[in-house]
Structure formats: structure tokens, C-alpha cells
Image (cartoon, rainbow, N blue to C red):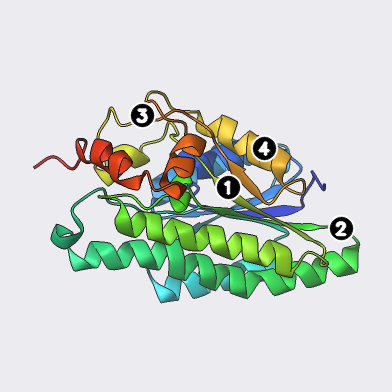
Amino acid sequence: MRRQYERALITGATSGIGEAFADVLPASTDLILTGRNAEKLGALQERLAVGGRAVEIIEADLRSPTDRKKLISRSETLKTDLFVNNAGLGFFSHFTETPADDEAAMVDVNVVAVHELTHALLPGMIERAKQTGERAGLIIVSSVIGHLPMPYFATYAATKAFDLALAEGLAEELSQEPVDILALCPGATATDFQARAGAPNDMFDRAESSISVARKAMRALGRRRVLVSQLPMRFGLSYNTAIHRIASSGAHAYFKRLMRHGPKE
């Protein structure tokens, strides 16, 4: 596994797992950080651009086709060799009551942007890796929810299932190319995602730190294709157990327990 990259692009870099990746990558790796919050991006740049390290920030809303094209163009110019496709958006709510714009936003950020950026950047990453004799890296951040259909998170879970399938499919399809591809499926993680999504505060027993998730992902890149955080849910089931029970026709009972923790009216 290649552990040193020249330049990494990280989407959703202003908080949570995206920011953690920026923190755990070695100072020898230059960074391209993107997000919607210009103030937070500036603070990250100031904190991380030390010792001659180049840190470029690009304010971008991945729901916007124009912003996606801007990000692709700049990343190609700077010759990214590690791409952490991390930005995500979710809403914990009744499907029939969620505004159509919110539903579309989840698909735009979690599916369209992930697909478009990967499709545009991966060929150049592979070609440069062939020229240098090194290996490129691609991490697509899915979720344990990508393995589980979930009430109140139906659209979010579906988008993360897409991310998981895309990463796994590409890892096999490109297995003979100089690129390592990882589907990262975090469990409950100590970020502000849950609060922003409107999910119950007590939905999980405990959460893993985003730094821990990012470190595990970098260790796994090049060694495996899928990394799932195995943390217990509030219902007393590990994710692996929950997945097994759903596969064994236990979905009804599992969902019935989850429904007790639905969106607040």
C-alpha cells in the first residue's frame, strides 16, 4: 500500500470525517479542501499550511453543476493522486413529508456529485500513477446504513448503498490498474451530522471519533475494499448482527424497534 501521496482532494472537509482526513494525512501531502463554509475553509488552510505544505481551498456546493465542474478542473490542474470523496447530506424524516428539494439535495450530493467527480478524476489519477510507477488512492465514504434499508433515512440509505456499490464495483473492475479503492462505511461517528440530519440524540450507545475513522481508513486503503465500523446500536445489536438479521428475514422486528425513535413531531 502506498502511504505517501503528493496531493489529496477532500470533499466535505470543513467538519467531521472530512476534516479528520485532512488532519491525519502527513504534512508531506499537499491538500485541496472543499466545502460550503468559506470561513471554516480559511481556518483549516491557516492551521494546516505549515512547513511549506500547500493547502488550496475551494468553496463549492456540490449540489451545483457549476461548482462541481470548477472543482474537477482545479483538481485536474493540480494533479490529485488521492481523492477522499466524503461530502454527504442526510435528513432523518418521514419520506412523504420531506420537502422535494431536500430529497433532491441528498441525491445530488451523495450520488450525482460522487459519481461525477469520480468519473471525471479517476482516469487522470490512473494515468499519472502509470507514469510515476506509484499507486493512486480513492476513498468513497458510504455508511453502515448503505448496508441497511432504514425507515426515516430511506433516501439517505439508498444513496449510501449506491456509493458502496460504486466503490466495490470499481475496485473489482480496476483491480489490475494502479489505484487502490476503498468503500468506507462508518458507523455512529462523533460529528455534527446526526444533529444536522435531525436524528434522535440517543439513537446510538456510543460514537467513534472521526479521527479514529480516518486513521482506520488510511490503514485499510490498499489492503481491503470495504471498511465497516462495527459499533453497537442503541437497540443492543451490532451492525453485523443487524445486517445478518435483516438478511434472515428479521427486518420487521428490527424496523419496529427503530420506529420508536422516529422523527420528532
- Residue type at mark 2? Glu
Which residue shows up at 73% across the image and 43% down it? 52
Q: Label 4 to label 3, Cα distance in Å?
A: 37 Å
Residue closest to the eye, 183 or 43: 183
* Residue at the spot of label 2: 134
* CB-based contact (under 8 Å), mark 2 and mark 4: no
Up-down relation of residue 187 to residue 1 (above or below): above
Horizontal side, residue 128 vs residue 82: left or right = right
Which residue shows up at 46% across the image and 54% down it? 87
Local crowd at mark 4 within 10 Å, few (<14), some, or many (≥20)? few
* CB-based contact (under 8 Å), mark 4 and mark 3: no
* Residue at the spot of label 4: 50
Q: Label 4 to label 1, Cα distance in Å?
A: 28 Å
x, y percentage for residue 14?
46, 45
Indicate which disc, 2 or 3, sits on the residue closer to the N terminus: 2
Up-down relation of residue 25 to residue 153 (above or below): above
Which residue shows up at 37% across the image and 43% down it? 250
Residue closest to the eye, 154 or 36: 154
Q: Label 2 to label 1, Cα distance in Å?
A: 22 Å
Mark in front: 2 vs 3? 3
Disc sitting over residue 204 in the figure: 3
- Residue type at mark 3? Phe
Element under label 2? loop
Which residue shows up at 54% across the image and 57% down it? 164
Disc sitting over residue 184 in the figure: 1
Q: Label 2 to label 3, Cα distance in Å?
A: 40 Å
Residue closest to the eye, 206 or 128: 206
Indicate which disc, 4 or 3, sits on the residue closer to the N terminus: 4
Residue closest to the eye, 164 or 27: 164
Q: On the image, which quarter does residue 236 sit in?
A: top left
Q: Label 1 to label 3, Cα distance in Å?
A: 19 Å
Indicate which disc, 2 or 4, sits on the residue closer to the N terminus: 4
